[in-house]
């Protein structure tokens, strides 16, 4: 088991249970936060109308664009547009975000959004 396995597991549990403070604490312990869990933190911020959401979403978008095999430019643009709608408190934006992520074959990221929707956020 790697040194970051425990913080990543805690991060995943915190994101799934909607605990922003616990997610942030676990993320600080991780050497690198996976893209899907980073998206989960963004969603938690959006849910709480946290003023840090915009910056976090931009950083997430930068990572999305920089990582290899993360969809076409058009697919990434659709993902970011849907994420911006989520930040604008548009509940339908979550569904659009999940669809855009699935279209770009980003299954683990889409699952985070779908779990977020399922828990009634």
Image: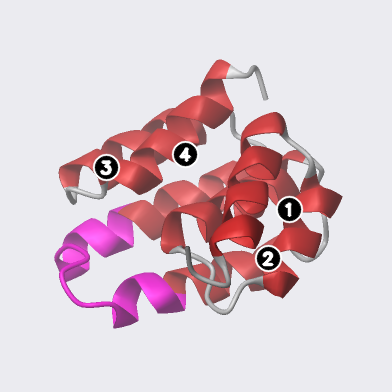
Q: CA distance from mark 1 to mark 3?
A: 21 Å
Q: Earlier in the sequence, mark 1 or mark 3?
A: 1
| Mark 4 in CB contact with mark 1 (< 8 angstroms) | no
Q: Out of 44 and 97, give the one closest to the viewer.
A: 44
Label located before the other in sequence (4 or 2): 2
Q: Is residue 114 above or below residue 23?
A: above
Measured Cα–Cα span from mark 4 to mark 3: 9 Å
Q: Secondary structure at mark 4?
A: helix
Q: Which residue is mark 2?
A: 27
Contact, mark 1 vs mark 2 (Cβ under 8 Å)? yes
Say which quadrant the C terminus sits in.
top right
Viewer-side label of 1, 3? 1
Q: Nearer the viewer, mark 4 or mark 2?
A: 2
Q: Point out the stretch of residues depicted in magenta.
A: 62-78
Query: Which picture quadrant has residue 8?
Result: bottom right
The answer to whether the residues at label 1 and label 3 have Cβ atoms under 8 Å apart is: no
Dot 3 corresponds to which residue?
A: 107
- Circle 1 sits on which residue? 23
Q: Which residue is mark 4?
A: 112
- Label 3, secondary structure: give it: helix
Closer to the eye: label 4 or 1? 1
Q: Position of residue 3 (x, y in %)?
A: 57, 72
Residue 54: x and y in percent read 67, 66
> In this image, 30 relative to 96: left or right?
right
Residue drawn at x 57%, y 69% as measured from the top left: 4
């Amino acid at each position: 088991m790697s040194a970051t396995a425990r913080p990543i597991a805690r991060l995943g549990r915190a994101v799934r249970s909607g605990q922003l403070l616990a997610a942030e604490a676990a993320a600080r312990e991780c050497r690198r936060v996976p893209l899907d869990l980073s998206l989960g933190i963004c969603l938690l911020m959006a849910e709480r109308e946290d003023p840090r959401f915009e910056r976090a979403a931009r950083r997430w978008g930068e990572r999305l664009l920089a990582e290899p095999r993360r969809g076409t430019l058009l697919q990434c643009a659709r993902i970011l547009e849907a994420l911006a709608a989520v930040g604008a408190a548009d509940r339908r934006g979550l569904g659009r975000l999940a669809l855009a992520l699935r279209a770009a074959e980003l299954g683990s990221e889409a699952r985070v959004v779908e779990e977020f929707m399922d828990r009634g956020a």
